[in-house]
Amino acid sequence: MYTEKEKRIEYFTVLGRRLDDFGNNTPSNQVIEKAIEENRWFSREDILQAVRAIRTQMLDHDLLSQWLAPYSLATEPKKVGIIMAGNLPLVGFFDLLCVLISGHEAWIKPSSKDRILMDYIVGQLHDIAPELPIQPLGDRIPDAIIATGSNNTNRYFRSRYGKIPAILRGNRASAAVLSGNETVSQLHGLAADIFTYSGLGCRNVSHLLLPAGYDINPLLSLFSEYRPVHEKYRHNFTQRAAILKLQNQPFLAGDFFLLREDETLPAAISEITYHFYEDSSQVQQWLYDNDSQLQCVVGDPLPHPRAVKFGEAQSPRLSDYPDAIDVLSFLSTL
């Protein structure tokens, strides 16, 4: 006889098995086509990458069991609202997983930019387990809220949901720390960390910390192998290059990206900033000073609580909580 926790784990394990064939059959290919029509920033490769990361890192039976082991399911389920971002395919899935697998009700508001894919996943879950409590958030005030958006929308979230338990997420970016001893394979992994999803995600690396004397020019040719497919991305690149030229700011230009020396995180898509460090203490100080703006830090080895290896930024594990806020722990206190 399954316990309730084991049943929830099995539901999501079955979902993972169903996603094994995603992109290899007519129904899922139709979903992919519709999702791209709704959001021209999405590509087939983006969607398949997102589904693959979810399937392998979040929907494996053993991984789910290990992740949930320290937690108990809710004995008094609460109505938990989830306001999802839409900058990446299925970026709101993890919060849905957390709410449902912890035993609560999910009142969801998918982004209009990602509604097709999220509707597909919700449909699959309802087919697997019709009793799973998933319904639209609408204009209702739930018992608790998990909301993800820009810093501007985050202020609105605080105003509207200020009286209920909440996880409210705004803008973040990611950085990479290089030692100068990286292999070609690691640098290709770094390129994927930067350019996957056209750099739109909070886990996309957009700042590089380089050892003093590092020759950055070879990165130009290596990064150039990762060409974006979106016209919108190229428009951002052209526009940003023009602005920097008008401002007389120096930069290095690849075919579709800019490298600019600056200690701050860039504000524009297609731009990568970098700065040089003399020793590890300078690295640690920069990471400390910018911690509230960082989602993850790429490097190997790297003593940082949100460190990931080169090439793994876009495949977050179950324990890689956004903004380092343990969602399951939050849900367990409701």
Image: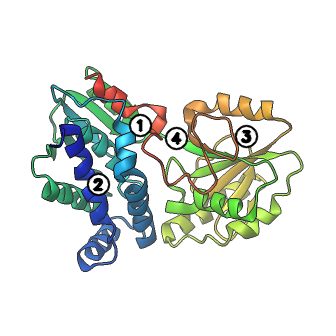
> In terms of image quadrants, where is residue 72?
top left
Question: Which residue matches tag 3?
Answer: 263
Question: Which residue matches tag 4?
Answer: 172
| x and y percentages locating residue 76 in the rendered image | 15, 25
The answer for how far apart the CA atoms under marks 1 and 3 are is 24 Å
Pointer 1 and pointer 4: residues touching (CB < 8 Å)? no
Give the residue type at disc 3.
Glu
Residue at 49%, 70% (x, y): give it: 230
Question: Which residue matches tag 1?
Answer: 152
The answer for how far apart the CA atoms under marks 1 and 4 are is 13 Å
Give the residue type at disc 2.
Thr
Pick the residue in front: 301 or 201: 301
| x and y percentages locating residue 304 in the rendered image | 63, 35
Under circle 3, the secondary element is: loop
First reached walking from the N terminus: tag 2 or tag 1: 2
Compared across the picture, whether 115 is left or right of 306 comes to left
